[in-house]
Image (spheres, rainbow, N blue to C red):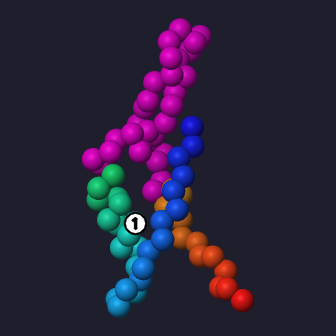
């Protein structure tokens, strides 16, 4: 499974603060447990895979800052 989005933010008057965005997501991600989980296969394929909390979940791996090249 892959889920990707592209978000375009208008920095407005105060500018864009990446660390504040990550902090906001971290505060609210508890409301959507699936976003912190991973699929785990059942041994012997006796049942369908199950969702488990990922103890190694790292938000900064999933929320990355990047920018497009400036137009010429």
**Which residue appears at 34% of the width and 89% of the height?**
14
For the record, the magenta segment spans: 30-59
Instruction: Name the side, left or right, on which 7 lies relative to 68.
Output: left
Q: Residue pushed farthest right?
A: 72
Q: Position of residue 22 (x, y in %)?
A: 40, 66
Residue at image mark 1: 22
Q: Quadrant of the C terminus?
A: bottom right
In the image, residue 3 lies in the stretch drawn in magenta? no
Q: Quadrant of the N terminus?
A: top right
Q: Is residue 34 above or below residue 43?
A: below
**Which residue appears at 34% of the width and 41% of the height?**
33
Q: Position of residue 20 (x, y in %)?
A: 36, 73
Q: Is residue 52 above or below residue 13?
A: above
Q: Nearer the viewer, residue 48 or 2?
A: 2
Count of numbered circles on the image: 1
Q: Nearer the viewer, residue 1 or 41?
A: 1
In the image, residue 33 lies in the stretch drawn in magenta? yes
Q: Nearer the viewer, residue 5 or 37?
A: 5
Q: Position of residue 34 (x, y in %)?
A: 39, 39
Res. 27 image quadrant: bottom left
């Amino acid at each position: 499974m892959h889920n990707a989005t592209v978000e375009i933010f208008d920095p407005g008057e105060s500018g864009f603060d990446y660390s504040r965005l990550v902090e906001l997501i971290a505060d609210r991600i508890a409301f959507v447990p699936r976003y912190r989980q991973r699929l785990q296969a059942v041994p012997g394929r006796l049942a369908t895979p199950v969702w488990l909390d990922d103890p190694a979940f790292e938000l900064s791996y999933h929320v990355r800052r990047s920018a497009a090249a400036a137009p010429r």
